[in-house]
Image (cartoon, helix red, strand yellow):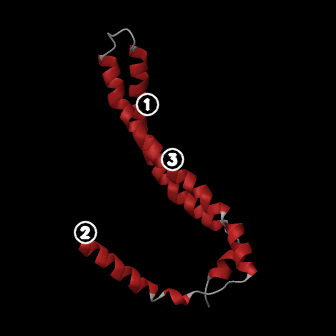
Amino acid sequence: MKNCIVILMFVSSFTLLYVNDAQAYGPEVYYAAAAAAPLPMESTKSVARVPKAAADLLYLPVGVLKVGMSILPSVSMADGFNDIGRGLVAPFHVAAAVLQVPFDVLSAAGRVPRNAVNTFVRR
């Protein structure tokens, strides 16, 4: 634990030596950043769809369990078959969500205003 703290202090002091490279930006930079900020947020929606689609994969074993336990009064076989169907379709939803991510990121990058890109590029 003591070694971890010493390493952390060494790394943080080393990075603090190079912090003095900060610059002040004018108001046009802030306006350009505010104009470009909503666009990357649109692509995060497609990134958030991937874990939701991957979680649907769990419906397959749950559905099989429900069908097997359908002899109990509170579990219906129809719910089990619905879950099995949802679990069987889930890999295709995962593939579609994963393939949608680069498209959304690139289309959001294409809609960034040109003045926002030119403001942050150093010449």
- Could you tell me residue 15's position as x and y percent? 42, 83
- Could you tell me residue 17's position as x and y percent? 45, 89
Side of 68 relative to 87 (left or right): left
Q: Residues within 10 Å of mark 1 (few under 14, many from 20)?
A: some
Secondary structure category for the residue under label 2? loop
Q: Residues within 10 Å of mark 3 (few under 14, many from 20)?
A: some
Residue at image point 62% right, 56% down: 42
Query: What amino acid type is highlighted by mark number 2?
Result: Met
Residue assigned mark 2: 1
**In the figure, 102 relative to 15: above or below?**
above
Residue at image point 51% right, 50% down: 48
- Could you tell me residue 12's position as x and y percent? 40, 80
Q: Residue furthest front?
A: 2
Secondary structure category for the residue under label 1? helix
Earlier in the chain: of badge 1 and badge 2, it is: 2
Q: CA distance from mark 1 to mark 3?
A: 16 Å
Residue at image point 33% right, 10% down: 72
The answer to whether residue 38 is seen in the rendering is yes
User: On the image, which quarter does residue 43 sit in?
Assistant: bottom right
Residue assigned mark 3: 49
Residue at image point 68% right, 75% down: 116
Tag of residue 86: 1
Secondary structure category for the residue under label 3? helix
Q: CA distance from mark 1 to mark 2?
A: 47 Å
Query: What amino acid type is highlighted by mark number 3?
Result: Arg
Q: CA distance from mark 2 to mark 3?
A: 39 Å
Earlier in the chain: of badge 2 and badge 3, it is: 2
Earlier in the chain: of badge 1 and badge 3, it is: 3
Query: What amino acid type is highlighted by mark number 1?
Result: Arg
